[in-house]
Image (cartoon, rainbow, N blue to C red):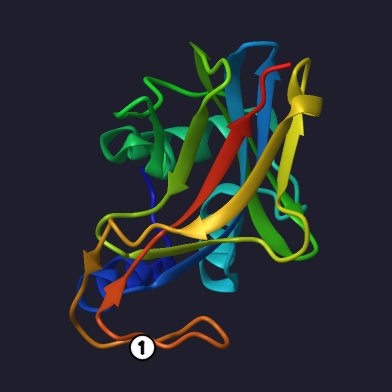
Amino acid sequence: MKYSLLLLAVLWECVFSHPHMFIDTEMEVRLRNDYLNGIEITWHFDPMFTAAICTDFDSNGDGQFSTGETAEVFANAFSNLENSSYFTFLSIGGQTLSPSGIEEFSVFMEQGALVYRFFCPFNIPVTGGVFRVAIYDCTYYCDILYREGSPITLSGPGSENAQFEIEQNDEIRISYGGSVSVSREGSTYSGTAYPQQLVVYMNSN
């Protein structure tokens, strides 16, 4: 596995500052009548991580990732997130679940930003209930927020009967220390963070 000096700098600075990486997320919640089929997650990255990945893995510098380059990104700059549950936590019926694996991984550039997109299969019943999806890094190296605009889509049979909202989960407290060398525009950093979560209400007809 190769690392550019820039990527090494990112990893080194992550040890001493929280947060260091900024991710804006979108989600497509795929329903199949009374089941949650899975969740397609899209991450838009900050300029520093974008530059690091492009430097190391876009070997011909064309701003696109071939099948081989995508496989290298997956192996060297994504697959280790399995150890962190892919930052994805589904709460339903008093249980918290995480994907056992992911499918359909892709990496591409959009408006100058690096983007990861992947699918988390679940295939669990959600009839007439409520479920929540929180995406967060418990170390707070990564500051993850929903993207501005319309970051949530419900799709598939049964989605027409569902409603959703985004809320802050005050029950999950992420404490972090160290200096803040970079910050998300408009954000303040107190040493404690609470993740955002999607709440989906399944309405039975």
Residue in the image at 70% along x and 11% along y = 33
Nearer the observer, 76 or 204: 204
- Which residue is labeled 1 in the image? 181
Q: Quadrant of the C terminus?
A: top right
Quick check: 40 left or right of 111? left
Residue in the image at 25% along x and 60% along y = 139
Nearer the observer, 11 or 24: 24
User: Where is 48 relative to 147, above or below?
Assistant: below
* Residue 18 image offset from top left, x and y in percent: 30, 75
**SS class, disc 1:** loop
Number of numbered discs on residues: 1
* Residue 39 image offset from top left, x and y in percent: 59, 29
User: Where is 203 relative to 59, above or below?
Assistant: above
Quick check: 130 left or right of 89? right
Residue that sits furthest to the front in the current view: 205
- Rate crowding at label 1 as few (under 14), some (14 to 19) or many (20 or more) other CA atoms within 10 Å: few
**Res. 104 in view:** no
Quick check: 10 left or right of 116? left
Badge 1 amino acid: Ser
* Residue 204 image offset from top left, x and y in percent: 67, 18
User: Where is 171 relative to 117, above or below?
Assistant: below
Quadrant hosting residue 54: bottom right
* Residue 201 image offset from top left, x and y in percent: 60, 34
Q: Quadrant of the N terminus?
A: top left
Residue in the image at 71% along x and 55% along y = 61
